């Protein structure tokens, strides 16, 4: 999986922004859904049927208060009806994040995370505050043009600090 680092004040103009969901990070390898810790996750048939045969970097998500429910689903396969898989990237596809995500078709309980382009750093911070005001965690900010790298990278930043 690709992992970001904390925002260090870098100019975010033109960067891709997605909500930083507070669920359980997951990786779909085209056949099996894996937890961040390497546990195979047993999914409901309707969720499994909506997944492609190529890799996805994603997260189990069940609302801003659903982290513990997602942990139960990842560990014991107990999914709620409202739980979904939110896709952030398609690692095996070519192009930058926006191009890679264009290859993913969301369906049913699988959706692509909404992505915005930051007009400025001030715009990114304002979006982060909006997300936090409704109980969300913050933003992930991806530098355009970068390939997916299975490592901790400096071109993917977590913007969640209170200002």
Image: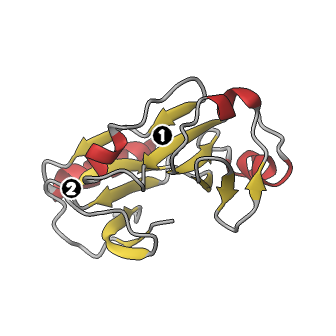
Q: Which residue is mark 2?
A: 15
Find residue 39 and report its horizontal and vertical position in percent: 75, 62
Q: Is residue 21 above or below residue 4?
A: above
Q: Is residue 145 left or right of residue 62?
A: left
- Say whether residue 34 is visible: yes
Residue under the image location 41 percent in, 61 percent down: 160
Left or right: 151 in relation to 65: left
Is residue 132 shown to the viewer in this render? Answer: no
In the drawing, does residue 90 fall left or right of residue 54? left
Q: Earlier in the sequence, mark 1 or mark 2?
A: 2
Give how far across and how far down residue 131 sits, in percent: 41, 44
| Residue at image point 67% right, 35% down | 48
- Mark 1 Cα-neighbour bin, 10 Å: few <14, some 14–19, many ≥20: few
Q: Which mark is residue 3?
A: none
Measuring 57% from the left and 49% from the top, which residue is drawn there? Answer: 59
Q: Kindly indicate the quadrant of the structure image that contains residue 104.
A: top left
Where is residue 4? Give x, y as percent: 41, 69
- In the image, 13 versus 100, the foreground residue is 100
Marks 1/2: CA–CA distance: 23 Å
Question: Quadrant location of the C terminus?
Answer: bottom left
Q: Secondary structure at mark 1?
A: loop
Image height of 90 relative to 49, above or below? below
In depth, the one of 43 and 7 nearer the eye is: 43
In the image, taking residue 163 as reference, residue 104 lies left or right, namely right
Query: Which residue is the site of mark 1?
Result: 134
Q: Tag 2, which secondary structure?
A: loop
């Amino acid at each position: 999986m690709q992992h970001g680092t904390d925002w260090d004040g870098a100019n975010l103009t033109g960067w891709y922004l997605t909500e930083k969901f507070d669920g359980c990070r997951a990786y779909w390898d085209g056949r099996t859904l894996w937890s961040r810790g390497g546990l195979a996750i047993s999914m409901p048939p309707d969720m499994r049927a909506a997944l492609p045969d190529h890799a996805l970097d994603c997260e189990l998500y069940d609302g801003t208060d659903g982290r513990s429910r997602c942990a139960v689903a990842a560990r014991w396969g107990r999914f709620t009806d409202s739980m979904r898989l939110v896709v952030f990237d398609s690692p095996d596809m070519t192009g930058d994040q926006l191009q890679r995500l264009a290859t993913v078709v969301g369906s049913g309980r699988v959706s692509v995370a909404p992505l915005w382009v930051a007009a400025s750093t001030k715009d990114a911070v304002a979006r982060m505050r909006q997300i936090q005001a409704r109980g969300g965690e913050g933003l992930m900010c991806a530098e355009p043009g970068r390939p997916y790298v299975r490592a901790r990278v400096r071109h993917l930043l977590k913007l969640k600090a209170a200002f």
